[in-house]
Amino acid sequence: MFMSFLLNSNCFCRLDSNQNLEMASKRIQKELKDLQKDPPASCSAGPVGEDMFHWQATIMGPSESPFSGGVFLVSINFPPDYPFKPPKVSFRTKVFHPNINSNGSICLDILKEQWSPALTISKVLLSVCSLLTDPNPDDPLVPEIAHMYKNQRDRYETTARSWTQKYAMG
């Protein structure tokens, strides 16, 4: 009898998918409210239509970067077990950057192994803005651009500025 209880007690530790969704939904709604009350500088975000699990964000290119003046669209998809798993965040606007590939995928540790449920979308957006200003060429998603950033900084900045004008300013 006691062994049977132990075997069956596992179900108390796991939430069923409806509870996960409900918890994720509450957390996402709270983050939306907090974002609207106190938005991060040069960023905005919110749901696409009625789908609380799919957001679109706008990031203004940081003034001290080759992305200055650009408006970058970012897609945010929350998993059903958010905040225990990170959101999928990707650029919809083309960006010339060592940590952002042609599909818009972003190489940022907090979106992968360094994710913590204590993080919020506001903090994620600020980290993405920071990445635009300070690329991490030692952990690149696009090695050729990382090489250019390290060895031909002027060429990197000229190309990044050109892409910003072409894809993020019109």
Image: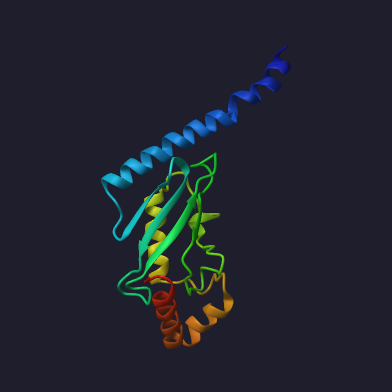
Give percent across and percent down for residue 67.
37, 73
Residue 166 falls left or right of residue 44: right
- Farthest residue, direction front: 170
- The number of numbered badges drawn on the structure is 0
User: Quarter-wise, where is residue 59 in the image?
Assistant: bottom left
Q: Residue 168 versus residue 97: which sits nearer the camera?
A: 168
- Rendered residue at 52%/42% (across/down): 84
Q: Quadrant of the N terminus?
A: top right
Residue 43 falls left or right of residue 95: left
- Farthest residue, direction left: 37
Q: Residue 94 versus residue 105: which sits nearer the camera?
A: 94
Say if 107 sits above or below 96 in the image. Answer: above
Q: Residue 84 versus residue 166: which sits nearer the camera?
A: 166
Say if 72 sits above or below 114 in the image. Answer: below
Q: Quadrant of the C terminus?
A: bottom left
Say if 140 sits above or below 154 in the image. Answer: above
Q: Residue 6 versus residue 107: which sits nearer the camera?
A: 107
Tell me how the rendering is colored: rainbow
Give percent across and percent down for residue 24.
48, 37
- Rendered residue at 35%/68% (across/down): 61
User: Quarter-wise, where is residue 125 in the image?
Assistant: bottom left
- Rendered residue at 51%/68% (across/down): 100
Give percent across and percent down for residue 2.
70, 14
Residue 4 falls left or right of residue 128: right
Give percent across and percent down for residue 138.
53, 73
